[in-house]
Each structure stands twice: as structure tokens, then as C-alpha cells.
Image: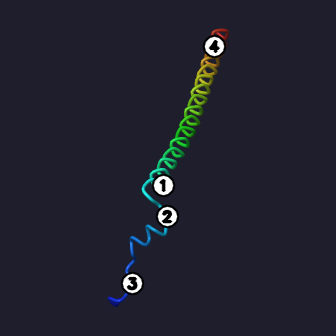
């Protein structure tokens, strides 16, 4: 750990990347736009799946109700 180790030159690093504030702003805007698009797509998929699950639950409830009515009808016929 000598004091002679080279220190990174932040000005040189920024110059090497070639990123001026406008390019960085554009990059961040594009990144946020892409993330928003992906988030929207995922949200739509989740909502679609929840709707489908809701329909399946309703169908299941109806089938259970129908079965319970059939059982009640059979019990009434046995009496």
C-alpha cells in the first residue's frame, strides 16, 4: 500500500466513455421508457391471468352449487 499507486483520473474516465450530459439524459430516458413498456406488458399479463382465475373460480362455484342441488334432489327422492 504505497502512496505511489496511481489514482484514477475521473476527468479522463468521463472523457473515455464519450458521455456528455445530453447523451446520458437520452440513455436514461430510453432506459426508463423500455422499463415502462416492460412493466406495462407484465401488468397486462398479470391482469389477464387474474381475470382468467376469476372466471375459473366462478365456474367452480357454479359447479359446486349444481352438485349440491343434485345431492339435495337425490336426498329428497330417498325420503
Cα separation between marks 2 and 3? 22 Å
Choose mark 3 or mark 1, whichever is in front: 1
Residue on which disc 2 sits: 18
Residue on which disc 3 sits: 6
Residue on which disc 4 sits: 75
- Residue furthest toward the left? 3
If you read the primary sequence from the N terminus, does the residue marked by circle 2 or circle 4 appear first? Answer: 2
If you read the primary sequence from the N terminus, does the residue marked by circle 3 or circle 1 appear first? Answer: 3
Secondary element at image label 3: loop
- Is 32 on the left-hand or right-hand side of 44? left
Residue on which disc 1 sits: 23
How many other residues sit within 10 Å of disc 4, few (<14), some (14-19) or many (≥20)? Answer: few
Q: Are marks 2 and 4 in contact (CB under 8 Å)?
A: no
Cα separation between marks 4 and 3? 91 Å
How many other residues sit within 10 Å of disc 3, few (<14), some (14-19) or many (≥20)? Answer: few
Residue 50 occupies quadrant: top right
Q: Are marks 2 and 1 in contact (CB under 8 Å)?
A: yes
Amino acid at each position: 500500500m504505497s502512496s505511489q499507486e496511481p489514482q484514477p483520473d475521473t476527468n479522463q474516465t468521463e472523457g473515455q466513455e464519450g458521455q456528455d450530459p445530453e447523451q446520458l439524459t437520452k440513455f436514461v430516458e430510453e432506459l426508463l421508457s423500455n422499463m415502462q413498456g416492460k412493466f406495462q406488458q407484465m401488468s397486462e399479463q398479470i391482469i389477464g391471468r387474474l381475470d382468467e382465475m376469476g372466471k375459473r373460480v366462478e365456474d367452480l362455484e357454479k359447479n359446486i352449487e349444481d352438485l349440491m342441488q343434485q345431492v339435495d334432489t337425490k336426498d329428497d327422492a330417498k325420503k
